[in-house]
Image (tube, grey):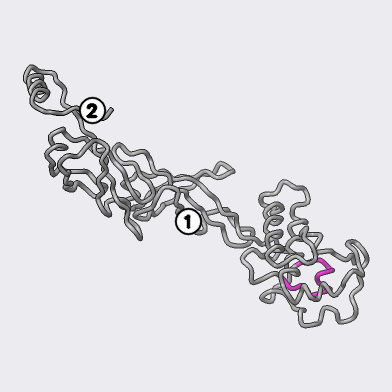
Amino acid sequence: MKYKDYYEVLGVERDADPAEIKRAYKRLARKYHPDVSKERNAEERFKEIGEAYDVLRDKDKRATYDNLGNRWHSGDEFTPPPGWSSGPNAGGGFGGERFDFSDFLDSMFGGRGAHGDPFATPFGNSRARGSDERATIIITLEEAYRGGERSISLKNSRGATRNLKVKIPAGIRQGQQIRLAGQGQAGRGGQSGDLFLSVELAPHALFRPQGADVHMNLPITPWEAALGASVKVPTLGGKVDLKIPAGSQSGRKLRLKAKGLGGSKAGDQYVTLQIVTPAANSEAAKRLYRKMAEELDFDPRKNI
């Protein structure tokens, strides 16, 4: 039988650490997964990559394999000594099931399958967890505030449509994800992947979300700004009273604590004041403005 250089299969050096080996395996397994790869030899490479990882990720198996040293090169004939596969690393498979690994691996370890790692799969049977899928869900700011349930339709790569119910957690923010377990791609003999929905908030007529906080502009009259007032202000939870301090100017920002999006830590609502001047569209309004100009000692440009 032919000797297999598992380090060469994974494209790592012989002194590679376990993290390096795992990274190489993940990268190659994604590339050659039979469900997604366009390579002609994808299934064979996928099996070979899994076989190499099954040996090199296990400290004892790797030590046994490394004992072969440099006596063989990839493709050279390999004849195991008597009883080679009956040592402490031998076994009858994973959970009593025997997998179709290569003769070389069978000779070394008695055909033990991969186990104990979420990315390891019994490659001879082409078992694999399905891939995760990602999509975007657009929700209103009110839905993000209160939470709720939404029905969505998704079309897969084959054009088939499926309908799902999505539970929207109260207080979810822009860019956060909702995970639907088992709603990703079907597994190849294993469990299905997950579906991750990235949340996008639809534009709102009044509010601008920033993380857990919400912002809004509040129009006020000149006399409310000058004299101070208590006015009703809309929030995601309903209208509340807001005290405007006397002498306020346009651009002043006031905070309504914990009136933003909820969740583990509720955000705040920030209100930016905008003074709106009444139109001088009547004789009475014009007389009032003239009187203000005569009686008020006010020049907004005196420091310019």
Q: Quadrant of the N terminus?
A: bottom right
Tell me how many marks there are: 2
Q: Which mark is residue 138?
A: none
Which residue is drawn at the image coordinates 70% and 51% (left, top)? 31
In the visual, does 144 lie left or right of 64?
Answer: left
Magenta residue check for 163? no
Provide the residue designation for mark 1: 180
In the visual, does 132 lie left or right of 208?
Answer: right
For label 2, count other residues whose C-alpha is less than 10 Å away and answer few (under 14), some (14-19) or many (20+).
few
Q: CA distance from mark 2 to mark 1?
A: 62 Å
- Is the residue 33 above or below the residue 300 in the image? below
Magenta residue check for 109? yes
Residue 166 in picture, x, y percent from top left: 41, 52
In the visual, does 75 lie left or right of 227?
Answer: right
- Is the residue 177 above or below the residue 102 in the image? above
In the image, the segment drawn in magenta is 100-113
Q: Check the image and name the residue furthest to the top.
A: 283
Residue 241 in picture, x, y percent from top left: 16, 47
Which comes before the other along the chain, label 2 or label 1? 1
Secondary element type, mark 2? loop
Provide the residue designation for mark 2: 302
Which residue is drawn at the image coordinates 50% and 46% (left, top)? 135
Figure quadrant of residue 205: top left
Which one is nearer the viewer's eye here, 105 or 254? 254
Q: Quadrant of the C terminus?
A: top left
Amino acid at circle 1: Leu
Amino acid at circle 2: Lys
Residue 113 in picture, x, y percent from top left: 72, 70
- Is the residue 248 above or below the residue 73 in the image? above
Which one is nearer the viewer's eye here, 64 or 288? 288
